[in-house]
Amino acid sequence: MRIALEAMGGDHGPRPAVEGAVLAAERYNIEVALVGRRRHLERLLTALKVDDPRISIVDAPDVIGMNESPRKTLAKRQSSLAVATDLVKRGEADALVSAGNTGAVLAHTLLSWRTLPHIKKPAIATYLPTAHKDVIVIDAGANVDCKPHQLVHFAIMGSVYAQYVLKREAPRVGLLSNGEEETKGNEVVIETNQLLRQTDLNFLGNVEGNDVFSGDVDVVACDGFTGNVLLKAAEGIASLMFKMMKKEVSRSILAMIGAAAILPAARRIKKRCDYDEYGGAPLLGVNGVAIIAHGRSNKKAFMNALRVAADCYNLNLVRHLHEELIRIGKQIGETADTGAKE
């Protein structure tokens, strides 16, 4: 298989992307097409002394900035993102990885690949660590305003991802709300709850913010505004806790001795909270495999993003999503099979 890596996206330029591609090729035997400015990428490969036939370059002279309007970026047909997306559309690559402008990734994949049945708004599925195992939060930022049917779609796609990629049997699905009761939440959440109860998903009902981290559910469905706030708050709390621990440890010799004893455990906890380990978040609902990596991704994060992309492709994730969206769509009264390519 071959993965198109948009090498010019991200906050740190193309070097981490190139280094991550080399690591992915060596560790996971993944073929990577580095998409970007050829001369720049060739210089990097030469500097890194890379001579691996699994690493190739596809020239794309233009670059999309992190703050550019997603709609306006569609006019940049020679950008690294546009070229990488088109490689997948033409069958010259099997998946896309980008750490660039998230809105632009959404816009380009929507225009080029279209969507799966019933889907009008694809969603970003991201990981949050819990007391037991990671939970999938979907949507994590692609859609600020959602309708009940769209939240049901998010729940379906999150469940499929948890089942086939994370190997969770009968994934437990929760709907994020301000109370566990069916009557809690705004009108959209209340109606979504009723719709989810008509499906054969393993729906546990509403979950509150503190329940997300209990490990009692595998998937949390919510709109992108709420999901992004939840994600950023969790990242902030994790950072605060580690900073507070460092500050308290430095207060006395006794505290330093105690800290040394728990250092291995602290490192394991930090690893579980590190986005580098997860690599990237899948964009679910488009008719192809797209992984959105963090803008601050280092070489390890890019390596893992490429691994996730390969897993999604090899496990036929898009086909499973297609089938479940049609099957469960019928349970909630959806009949139109539109959006997916044959």
Image: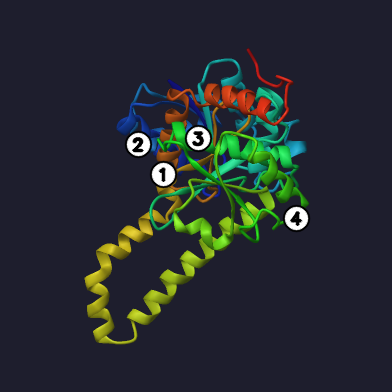
Please name which of the two marks, 3 or 2, marks the residue nearer to the observer. Answer: 3
Specify which label sits upstream in the sequence, 1 or 2: 2
Q: Amino acid at mark 2?
A: Leu
Q: Amino acid at mark 4?
A: Asn
Q: Is residue 300 above or below residue 269?
A: above
Specify which label sits upstream in the sequence, 1 or 4: 4
State how far apart marks 1 and 3 are (Cα). Answer: 25 Å
State how far apart marks 3 and 2 are (Cα). Answer: 25 Å
Classify mark 4: residues with Cα within 10 Å, few (<14), some (14-19) or many (20+): few
- Residue that mark 1 sits on: 299
Specify which label sits upstream in the sequence, 1 or 3: 3
Q: Secondary structure at mark 3?
A: helix
State how far apart marks 2 and 4 are (Cα). Answer: 46 Å
Q: Nearer the viewer, residue 199 or 75?
A: 199
- Residue that mark 3 sits on: 161
Specify which label sits upstream in the sequence, 3 or 2: 2
Q: Is residue 232 above or below residue 324?
A: below
Q: Is residue 178 left or right of residue 130?
A: right
Q: Is residue 245 above or below residue 235?
A: below
Q: Secondary structure at mark 4?
A: loop
Q: Amino acid at mark 3?
A: Tyr
Q: Is residue 55 left or right of residue 184?
A: left
User: Which residue is drawn at the image coordinates 46% and 52% (left, top)?
Assistant: 216
Marks 2 and 1: in contact by CB < 8 Å?
A: yes
State how far apart marks 1 and 2 are (Cα). Answer: 8 Å
